[in-house]
Every structure is written in C-alpha cells, then in structure tokens.
Amino acid sequence: MKIPFRYQATNYDCVPTTFINALQYLFEREDLPPEVIHKVMQYSLDSINKRGELGRGTTGLACQLILQWVESYKPKDFKKFSIDYRYLQGGDVHLKQNNSIVSCLNRGGVALLRLCNNRVGSEFHYALALSADAECLYFFDPYYRVKNFSGDDAKAMEWLGDLEREGFSKGQSPNLRIRRERLDAEKYEKYSMGPIDERECCLIERTYT
C-alpha cells in the first residue's frame, strides 16, 4: 500500500520530509524499514545559522550521508528494499537535452531538487520532482500553501493543491508545476535551481534484485 505524501512540520525540515516522501513514492508501506526513517531524521537538520542555532536546515553533506547509508542498507527482513542513487552538483544539474534529471523521472525514479527560495540566495528549499513534460516539471512541494503564486512567479509556476492526477497513487499527486525556463535559470529566482556552481540534486531509483 502506498502512503500519501506528508508536508513539513516546520520552516526548516524540507529535506527529511522530501526524503521520506521519495521513499514512500518508490515503496509500499510494508517494504519500508523503520531504520531508514530513523536515519533520515538522525542525519537531517544539521545546519547551524549565523546565531549558532542548530537545526535551521540540512546541509548537502548530510544529504550525501543519507543517500550513502540508505543505498548500503540491505535488511534481511525487508528484501524488497533496495535503491540506487546519484548525487549531482554544479554543471551536472540542468534541464538541457538528455539531462540526468528527466531521464531518471522517465524511468520511474524521483529527483530531490535544491531550489532557491528567494532572489538574494540566502534561502534554499528542497522539493520532490515526480514527472516532466516538454514545458514543465511536476513536483510535490512539502511546504504547504493556501494561496497561489502572484506576479511573474505566477507565469512560471502553479500551485496545484490536492488535485488528484491520473497515473499517481492516492495522495501522491504533484501539487506544484514549474516551467523548465524558471527551473534552469542561472540566477536567484523563486524556485529556480540558481547559479550553476551552487546547484545540487539527488536522484533516487528503486532497484529490483
């Protein structure tokens, strides 16, 4: 049984929430080891802000640690649990022809994308890419919102809310559509991937043995 996606509980836990949603998308509930959820939470929220406050986000290093641990974990009592991952940075994160992100989505995998959350590069956010077409990528954004986007942002993205879409399990439909041009913009814009040298992406696919 597939479980509906969850929304983040605070302004800072987008990474662990998105990781758990990715695993819920790829696996049935009975095939997900509880140790995996424990490790995702244990490694997350490791960032320290300028005031010395812990837990105000999750670092890229923590994302890599989560991926490495989850891929290597082979529990005997959860034999169907197995993933393959790629952690992409910099110039490898793009939406040009034959890109790794859309290729992964087309194979049934998911992409955890690090997105700009403002226009000055001081805040970033993770959302889960589920599918793509010629113009847009479709995400589950763990940051719940009531209002749609406005101004120029409304031309680049649309909040889809809880609308169920064909081809997705109940409660696992995309809630956000972003145009490719906005995502691939090389400057700080709302939900762009931003400057090339700051880009990060986690690709996860289920493997079958």
Image (spheres, grey):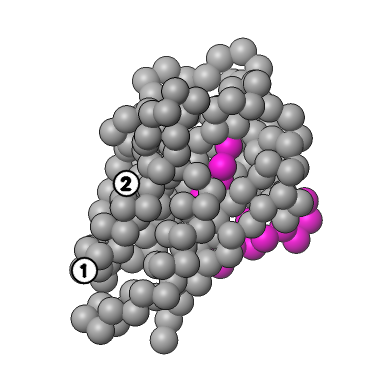
Q: Position of residue 43 (x, y in %)?
A: 37, 53
SS label for mark 1: helix
Q: Amino acid at mark 2?
A: Phe
Q: Amino acid at mark 1?
A: Glu
Mark 1 sits on what residue? 30
Residue lying farthest to the front in this orientation: 52
Please tell me which residue is depicted at 62% across the width and 48% down the height of the picture: 200
Please tell me which residue is depicted at 28% across the width and 48% down the height of the picture: 4
Q: Is residue 106 magenta?
A: yes
Q: Position of residue 168 (x, y in %)?
A: 39, 54
Structural crowding at the residue carrying mark 2, measured as other residues with C-alpha within 10 Å and reported as few (<14), some (14–19) or many (≥20): many
Query: Is 18 above or below relative to 31?
Result: above
Q: Is residue 78 magenta?
A: no
The number of callouts visible is 2
> In this rendering, would 117 be left or right of 143?
right
Q: Which residues are magenta?
A: 96-115
Mark 2 sits on what residue? 5
Q: Nearer the viewer, residue 183 or 56?
A: 56
Locate the C terminus and report the quarter of the image it occupies.
Answer: bottom left
Residue lying farthest to the bottom in this orientation: 209
Q: Nearer the viewer, residue 94 or 139?
A: 94
